[in-house]
Structure formats: C-alpha cells, structure tokens
Image: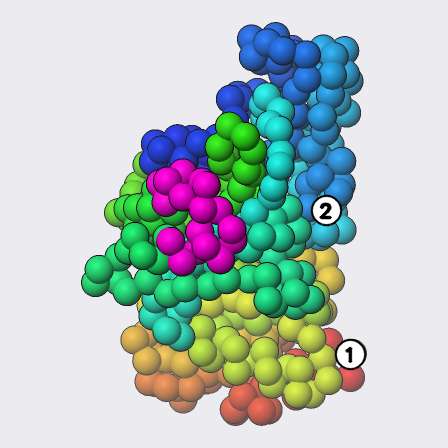
Amino acid sequence: MNIHEFQAKALFREYGIPVPDGEVARTVDGIVRIAKDLGGSRWVVKAQVHAGGRGKAGGVQVVDSLEQVEQVAETLLGSQLVTGQSGPEGQPVDQLLVEMPTDIDRELYLGLLVDRARERVVVMASAAGGMDIEEVAREHPEKLYTLYIDPVVGLQAYQCRQVIFALGLAEHAKAMTNIMQGLYRLFIDKDISLVEINPLVVNTAGMMAIDAKINFDENALYRHKHKSSLRDIRQEDEKEAQAHAHGLNYVSLDGDIACMVNGAGLAMATMDMIKHFGAEPANFLDVGGGTTAEKVAEAFKIILSDGKVKAILVNIFGGIVRCDLIAEGIIKAVKEVSVSIPVVVRLEGTNVEQGRKLLAESDLDVISAVDLDDAARKAVAAARGE
C-alpha cells in the first residue's frame, strides 16, 4: 500500500528523521494560509500523488510570492498530473504540500527494501541523489552502494559507517547514523516493504529528507489497522480499488482477453497461454481458492467495466470449492451481470462432470473447454470473432 509524501514525512518525524517544516491542504485558501504561517519569502509547493517524477511534470514548484503560491495552487488542485510513472491518464491532484525551501550542497539517495532471494532487508545508498535510482543502477552501477542486514542482529553501527565512508560523509557521521537507524526501526516496526529518501540533502546545517516514499506490506496491514486510513483510493486504479474492496486480487493490463482464475499460479499460467496463442490478457484476476458466487459476480462486473475486453476466459480448479458449485456461481453471475461478450469456461477438479453438465444445460451462450490449452485457443478465437 502506497502513501503520500506528507504521510511518510509524518512517520519520519516520529522516528527522528529530519524533514522540512510544512503542511498539506486541499484548497487554494488553505495553501495560501500555510505559506503565510510558515513565514519567509520562498516556498516549495508539491503535488501529492502516488507517482515519481513530479518535478519534471510541474508538480513541484518553488515560488517566491504569495501571489505565485495562489497561482500554482489554482493550477495544480483538481488537475491530473502526468509523470513518467503515472501512466498517460495521470493521477488526480487533490492536495498540496507546502514546505520551506532547503539549501542544498549535495543530494544523496537512501532506501531500504526487501531482497526476497536473500531473505534480507537491503540498504541501497548512492551519491547520485535526485535521479531515478533505476537509471543510476543501469548507467552508473558504481555509484550504487548496497549492504544486507541480518534479521537476527539488525542494522549494526559498523554497517552505517560503511555507508558513510562509501558516500564520503565522515563529517556528518552522527547525523547519517541516526537517519539510517531511524529508517530501519521504522521499516521493521511498521512492516514496510519499501522506504526511500530521494533526495537526502546535505548542507552546512546537517542532513534532511527532502522527499519521502513508503510502501506498506499489505499482507501485514492486519497488524496495523489504523494504517489502512492512510490509503488514498483516488490514487489507485478504479477497478483495482473495487476488487480490493471485495477481496479480489486484480491488476489491469493492456490486452483484450479478460481472465478470471482461482490461484495466482494458475492465473499466471492462463495469461501465458493467452500470449502463447498470439493475444494479450486484459488483466490479472485471482478470485481466491474459496471463491463464491458473490465473488464471481463482482469479478464479472469489474471485468465488464473495462471497455476494451472482447472475451472472458474463466479458468477454475475446483479443489477447496466443488466445480458444480462454481458452475452455479458462474451461471448466476452471468445472468445477473448480463454479459454480452463471449465467455469461455474451463473447469477441472472435484465434481467437474457435474459442473460441466450444469453449464451445458444452462441457457447461456458459454463456450466450454476441456483443458487450459483448449480454453486459451477458444478465448483468442472468440475475441477475434472467429
């Protein structure tokens, strides 16, 4: 689960990580009031969206008068900010963060994430802050320093010193150590999957996190129920948000054949078979091992809200739930949602013959398939009108 920059900085403050003074507001008047309250004659106005590259897209602006603050707020609030990471439609700007500007001598990058292959939290640091870390890793790998943290002992002081010397920060050793240890405590305490500071600014006054990015591990949110209130549904794909609300795992893709599958591995195999026969999947949709007729109906609704879908491939393995019950759910859902595009169904598992019989005897125009290969081939042909 992603959160906004201002929310991440609030967590940084809790863990002693220095950030600029600032506040967030949703109205032009509120933005101007914050600038007045902060004082000074220059401010940074930052659009709060779940996407990087805001500065290049005009979502971060330095202004030197209250009139400019008002003008920028009027321009950004209510707009769709299109960045290199947002997609062509952009993301809605509903709130702005106003901060005091910070003097910059050096810009660094500091991040923590999970390396699942090594089963370790990895620290990534670079003297090339302010740039996309992917670009740094690709074009200047020598500028990216990494170290792995043993989960038994946690981040050690000597590891902080390794990063400090690698980045040439000897005169800021204490500040950098405090920031790294604070980030690690935050990472572990809140079950975070990714935290980034880019840039981490160095100046004569010390060090400060100018930007902040945090992703929470959704599988651990049950331990931090209050963190769910930080979710901004408007920043998420509408169909994905709707699926999340009904306990479905859904990701939008660019193809025209929708998939409805129970089990992530089976869903990936289904998508691979669609591509094998020369087409593209419109989504990843896992309805779960214990799917119900209600879930199937909601899944159909979400799929049909995608105007580019030309066919639906339902691939269900009846293990936990019997195939005849799944077939009943499909029949009920298709009737309820009034599906008007071809539906290919492949059932396998417990009571599969009863399930296939129910589909065959229904008055629905459902295309039955005997295996995944047959199902994918028929779905691609149906999407092409063959």
Specify the label residue 154 is tagged with. Answer: none
Does residue 95 appear in this view? no
Q: Secondary structure at mark 1?
A: loop
Residue 182 placement (x, y as % from top left): 34, 42
Q: Nearer the viewer, mark 2 or mark 1?
A: 2
In this view, the residue in front, 122 or 372, is 122
Does residue 19 appear in this view? yes
Check residue 165 for magenta coloring. Answer: yes
Q: Secondary structure at mark 2?
A: loop
Lateral position of residue 332 relative to residue 183, left or right: right
Q: Amino acid at mark 1?
A: Arg
Q: Is residue 51 above or below residue 331?
A: above
Lateral position of residue 361 relative to residue 288, left or right: right
Lateral position of residue 340 relative to residue 290, left or right: right
Residue 60 placement (x, y as % from top left): 69, 33
Q: How is the image coloured?
A: rainbow
Point out the residue furthest to the left here.
152
Magenta stretch: give its range. 161-179
Q: Which residue is mark 1?
A: 384
Q: Amino acid at mark 2?
A: Thr
Residue 323 placement (x, y as % from top left): 38, 79
Q: Which residue is mark 2?
A: 83
Q: Earlier in the sequence, mark 2 or mark 1?
A: 2
Quadrant where the image shows the C terminus: bottom right
Residue 243 placement (x, y as % from top left): 49, 54
Residue at 55 percent across and 50 percent down: it is: 109
Quadrant in the rendering for residue 69: top right
Residue at 52 percent across and 82 percent down: it is: 269
